[in-house]
Amino acid sequence: MATVFIAGATGYMGRALIPELTGRGHWVRALARPGSIGKLPQRCEIVTGDALAASTYQERVQGADTFVHLVGVSHPGPAKAEQFRTIDLASVRESVAAAKSGGVRHFVFVSVAHPAPMMQAYIATRMAAEQLILDTGLDVTILRPWYVVGPGHRWPVVLRPAYWVLEHIPGTREPALRLGLVTWREMRSALVEAVEYPASGVRIVAVPEIRKSRRLG
């Protein structure tokens, strides 16, 4: 059984990941603002704090095996470039500080697939966040999905026929796979796998590897 600290626990992936981990016997400490506690699933240890201020929660990180960072601006788009810096990147900086001070050895970060022909500000911020994490010397798993299809995020399914064609053309196969769609279940499974099989050093999990994850059956 692992003890897992999750920042971004009340978000799109966090609320789905917590029941999977607790159902498999892991102990989850879930970070949430006071007004968001009601969004957390049952059977997790609630940590009240601010993801943008490590001082509000870092004492509760101690003893955790893995720190999972899921904080991010919802529905990212070009108009949110400033929020990427002040929320996404700033929260990673605080999470890294908390993980280091708490003696955590393994850090899991959900980044984004790159390079890509769009979302340049978002990608630049996520790459900067990756570098912050790598500079700590922690063992790290970095997942790089492009778009996660799931509840409230289903419109890209109409692109699947086009993806199929592009993945079978030699000249477009690599970018089509790198920027491919993954399902909500595949993403949860990849995160569970990251927790249950911690990286030794740096592990990058791209779209093809996320799709292959089978931890949830």
Image (tube, helix red, strand yellow):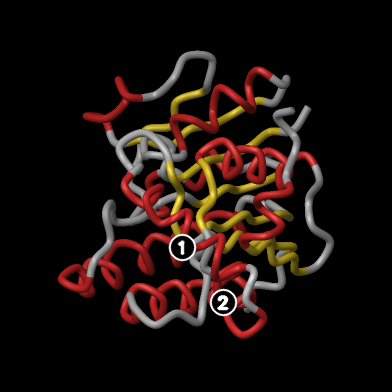
Q: Where is residue 16 in the image (x, y as percent from the top left)?
A: 48, 30
Left or right: residue 77 compared with residue 138: left
Q: Position of residue 163 (x, y in %)?
A: 51, 62
Closest to the observer, 170 or 123: 170
Left or right: residue 104 compared with residue 96: right
Residue at label 1? 162
Image position of 7 with respect to 205: above or below:
above
Crowding at mark 1 (Cα within 10 Å: few <14, some 14-19, many 20+): few
Q: Which of marks 2 and 1 is nearer the N terminus?
A: 1
Residue at label 2? 175
| In this view, the mark in front (2 or 1) | 1
Q: Residue furthest top?
A: 42
Name the mark on residue 3.
Answer: none
What is the quadrant of residue 78 in the picture? Answer: bottom left
Q: Which residue is drawn at 59% across and 29% down?
A: 28
Crowding at mark 2 (Cα within 10 Å: few <14, some 14-19, many 20+): some
- What kind of residue is marked 1? Ala
Q: Residue furthest left?
A: 79
Tell me the quarter of the image containing the C terminus: top right
- What kind of residue is marked 2? Pro
Q: Residue at x 51, y 52 (%)?
A: 69
User: SS for tag 2?
Assistant: helix
User: SS for tag 1?
Assistant: helix
Q: How far separated are the C-alphas under marks 2 and 1?
A: 13 Å
Q: Is residue 152 visible?
A: yes
